[in-house]
Image (cartoon, rainbow, N blue to C red):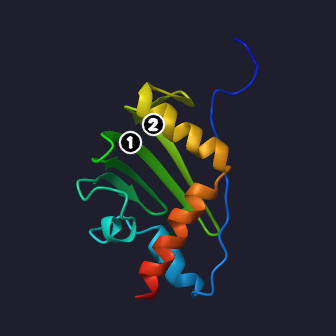
Amino acid sequence: MSRGRSSVAKVTYSVETELDPKIVWDGLTEFGPRRAQLWPDLSPSFKVLDRGEGWARVRECTDSLGIWSIERYEWREPVITATVEEANAAQAGQAKGFVGHLVHGLFQVTNGRFLAARTRRMHSKLRG
């Protein structure tokens, strides 16, 4: 077995906010009906496949782009990790298909800024 570079793509970002940390944490770990409202680029057809204390396995999709993924979220304050287990636009840390390459390129070029912008939009929804 080769011990070369990992095939896992990793994106890390941070966002500063004046919101109460508990409110932000609850928004980031919301996997109930309110999730699609907080994250408007996700389609309401997302589905929680399994959930436990500090983790959730979720099928999320953006129907307008025709993409979906099954992701495992794990959280222990202050870190949330999302691992893509299966997706129609990615495989083993690589993009797949036209839309997958487009989204992957956006993540790489913006170095997390795209994801940070999504999180800031979620924060604005938490403000009410």
Residue 75, relative to residue 103: is it above or below?
A: below
Badge 1 local density, few (<14 within 10 Å), some, or many (20+)? many
Q: Residue drawn at (46%, 33%), measured in percent from left and top?
A: 100
Q: Quadrant of the C terminus?
A: bottom left
Q: Which mark is residue 87?
A: none
Quadrant where the N terminus sits is: top right
State the residue at coordinates (34%, 67%).
35
Q: Amino acid at mark 2?
A: Glu
Q: First in sequence, mark 1 or 2: give its number.
A: 1
- Amino acid type at image mark 1: Ile
Give yes or no for contact between labels 1 and 2 (Cβ–Cβ under 8 Å): yes
Q: Which residue is mark 1?
A: 70
| Pick the front one: 13 or 101 | 101
Residue 11, percent from left and from top: 64, 47
Q: What residue is drawn where x is 53% and y is 78%? A: 24
Horizontal and vertical percent for residue 108? 64, 42
Give the farthest residue toward the top.
1
Residue 110, above or below 35: above
Question: Which residue does the numbered mark 2 point to in the structure image?
Answer: 85
127 or 28, nearer to the observer: 127
Q: Residue 104: x percent and y percent?
A: 55, 38
Secondary structure type for disc 1: strand
| Left or right of 73, for residue 17 | right
Residue sitting at the far left? 45
